[in-house]
Amino acid sequence: METEIVRIDPGRAREPESREILRRAGEIIKSGGLVAFPTETVYGLGGNALDATASRRIYAAKGRPSDNPLIVHIAETADLERTAVEIPESAYALAARFWPGPLTMILKKHPDIPTETTGGLDTVAVRFPSHPVAQELIAAGGGFIAAPSANRSGRPSPTTAAHCIEDLTGQVNMIIDGGEVGIGVESSIVDLTEERPVILRPGYITPSMLREVLGEVETDPGLDAAADLPPEAGSGNVPAGPGPKAPGMRYRHYAPQGSMLLVTGDEAAMVERIRQETAQALAQGKRTAVIASRETADAYPGGVRVFVAGSRHDPAEVAHHLFGILRACDEEGMEMICAEGFEEGELSRAVMNRLEKACGHNIVRV
Ligand code: TXA
Ligand code: MG
């Protein structure tokens, strides 16, 4: 398949020349094709959410197990009612506060949404993104776009069009380059189908922000499960019982090709341990990297490739850079990667969750 790459300046998404491109992109979606597009969190790989065949194509393009459900993206809150049924008041309250924005809600599925889109589940994930290119594309494509992150299964989510081009050239009809995304980690997911709301994936919308609207909110205890399934696991491989409730959170994800260790705890002890680990790796002749904070970046031996993720006091900055750094580790052939823990602030849960998955739960607490 030929992949067309087009460029839209997000600030000009509603100008006539952008609309013309988006109209064509919308036609691709409506005729069952696939378009990668920017959102405020990460790039998405979009197809018509109402078309079972389009959803199958998404799974194939990503190399994703078809039991891992897709998120349905809408461009107006009213379309929630065409996506879900038995919608609780809490969903409207969350929508009023956080939509458009980086929050996904799990609700009971509307019969018009094919089970191919929801990975066979009778629940559906819904999100109304704030990115103007995403909004215009959804509207042009008929209002309901199923979109997982636009990476090959198992790789870090894409935060630039270059990442999508790397992973999806030849697999999608069009890639819309809208520049670098703002947030850099995927949306927070909250499940509203149980008696009490449960966070299935931590993201930019933090537990305390959700609590302001919902009162109590729990976090899925399965998120800390130590083992991840390999990304190539086939349909039906998701085990029942303990483990994350969002099927996608059970798969290995983001892991770089080299071996990776996450070191958490007291700052001085953490730095000391990483100094030891990296010195040892260098002595073995390994290409060695550290994912560090700006504050501690100078602490590591010469010869170590230090990636500065951001300030230790600013998890949003770290979130913004993290996936790009994980990809760069592969590009630069890093064989041993040590990551510092980032545990300051509520948003650090989103960052740590991605780091824990990236290192395959190979974690040392000092
Ligand atoms: O920020 C985002 O959410 C991005 C952009 C493109 O919107 N999308 C994204 O999609 O991260 P994806 O497919 O990479 O992650 C969706 C997650 C997966 O872990 C999936 O298992 C979970 O949402 N999910 C989807 N539908 C679900 C459902 N009905 N019940 C539980 N988990 C669900
Ligand atoms: Mg993903």
Image: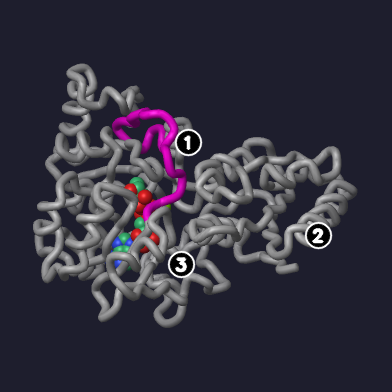
Q: Which stretch did the figure color magenta?
A: 168-187
Q: CA distance from mark 2 to mark 3?
A: 29 Å
Question: Going 60% across and 50% down the picture, which residue do you hit?
Answer: 313
Q: Quadrant of the N terminus?
A: top left
Q: CA distance from mark 1 to mark 3?
A: 23 Å
Q: Secondary structure at mark 1?
A: helix
The mark closer to the camera, 2 or 3, is: 2
Q: Is residue 198 above or below residue 111?
A: below
- Mark 2 vs mark 1: which is more N-terminal? 1
Q: Secondary structure at mark 2?
A: helix
Is 259 inside the magenta-drawn segment? no
Question: Going 16% across and 27% down the picture, which residue do you hit?
Answer: 23
Number of other residues with Cα within 10 Å of mark 1, as a class: few under 14, some 14 to 19, many 20 or more: many
Residue 238 drawn at (x, y percent): 41, 71
Query: Extreme right residue here?
Result: 283
Q: Which residue is mark 3?
A: 250
Q: Are marks 1 and 3 in contact (CB under 8 Å)?
A: no
Is 173 inside the magenta-drawn segment? yes
Q: Are marks 2 and 1 in contact (CB under 8 Å)?
A: no
Q: Which mark is residue 264?
A: none
The mark closer to the camera, 2 or 1, is: 2
Q: Which mark is residue 163?
A: 1
* Ligand 1 within 8 angstroms of badge 3 C-beta: yes
Q: Is residue 246 left or right of residue 225?
A: left
Q: CA distance from mark 2 to mark 1?
A: 32 Å
Q: Which residue is mark 2?
A: 273
Q: Is residue 20 above or below residue 188?
A: above
